[in-house]
């Protein structure tokens, strides 16, 4: 999960910053968004220095197969969904819809769990420490900005997302590239 080579690194945001991804929730404040991107960069640099082993099997994104759950905050989910490609709802808990042919198609905005997790057995304690540190940083951000703290499995957030900014032409039909998209929601 942490080191897939993505063909979509330079993907432009599909949902512009400032628009709502989740019905009934305010958009993430810019200061929080900026702080999270800085946290992502910090974590990426730390892990690059540690260089845990990755076999590039892609198994870590097939949750049911490896028996784990990707948890993330609503803040990370919002950033993820602003840039991630369209996907079909409902999403089940078994797989990440952004993994295509063992590659992550949402690599730039992927959440902390995807950045930190490696199956390298010699790295597990470090992984736990980094995760704990990162969650505390997110919680502090939430507290400092008076935001609700919500932490849940990936499919929970993906199934709540609305179609803000997703082109209507892609709504019910696979795109020419074969990607599926979010279903239409009633107005
Ligand atoms: S966003 Fe999905 S495909 Fe990408 S690294 Fe995370 S779990 Fe894997």
Image: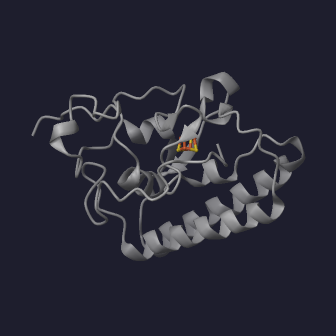
Outermost residue toward the right?
122
Q: Position of residue 32 (x, y in %)?
A: 45, 71
Ligand number 1: quarter of image: top right
**Residue at 24% over, 44% down:** 163
Q: Position of residue 122 (x, y in %)?
A: 90, 46
Of 57 and 126, which appears nearest the observer? 57
Q: Locate residue 119 relative to residue 100 in the image: left or right.
A: right
User: Residue 138's quadrant in the figure?
Assistant: bottom right
Q: Position of residue 126 (x, y in %)?
A: 82, 55
Q: Does 30 sit above or below residue 25?
A: below
Q: Position of residue 60 (x, y in %)?
A: 66, 35
Q: Locate residue 146 relative to residue 22 in the image: left or right.
A: right
**Residue at 78% over, 40% down:** 119
Of 42 and 177, which appears nearest the observer? 177
Q: Quadrant of the C terminus?
A: top left
**Residue at 41% over, 42% down:** 157
Q: Locate residue 24 relative to residue 137 in the image: left or right.
A: left
Tell me if I can see residue 77 in this picture. Answer: yes
**Residue at 54% over, 25% down:** 94
């Amino acid at each position: 999960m942490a080191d897939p080579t993505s063909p979509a690194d330079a993907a432009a945001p599909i949902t512009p910053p400032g628009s709502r991804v989740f019905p009934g929730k305010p958009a993430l404040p810019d200061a929080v968004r900026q702080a999270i991107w800085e946290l992502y960069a910090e974590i990426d640099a730390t892990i690059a220095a540690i260089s845990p082993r990755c076999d590039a099997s892609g198994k870590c994104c097939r949750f049911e197969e490896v028996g784990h759950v990707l948890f993330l905050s609503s803040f990370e989910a919002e950033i993820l969904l602003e840039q991630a490609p369209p996907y079909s709802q409902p999403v089940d808990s078994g797989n990440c819809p952004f993994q295509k042919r063992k590659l992550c198609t949402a690599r730039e905005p992927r959440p902390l769990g995807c950045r930190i997790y490696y199956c390298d057995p010699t790295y597990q304690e470090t992984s736990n420490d980094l995760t704990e540190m990162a969650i505390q940083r997110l919680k502090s951000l939430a507290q400092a900005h008076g935001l609700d703290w919500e932490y849940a499995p990936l499919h929970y957030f993906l199934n709540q997302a609305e179609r803000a900014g997703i082109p209507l032409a892609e709504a019910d039909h696979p795109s020419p590239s074969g990607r599926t998209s979010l279903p239409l929601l009633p107005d």
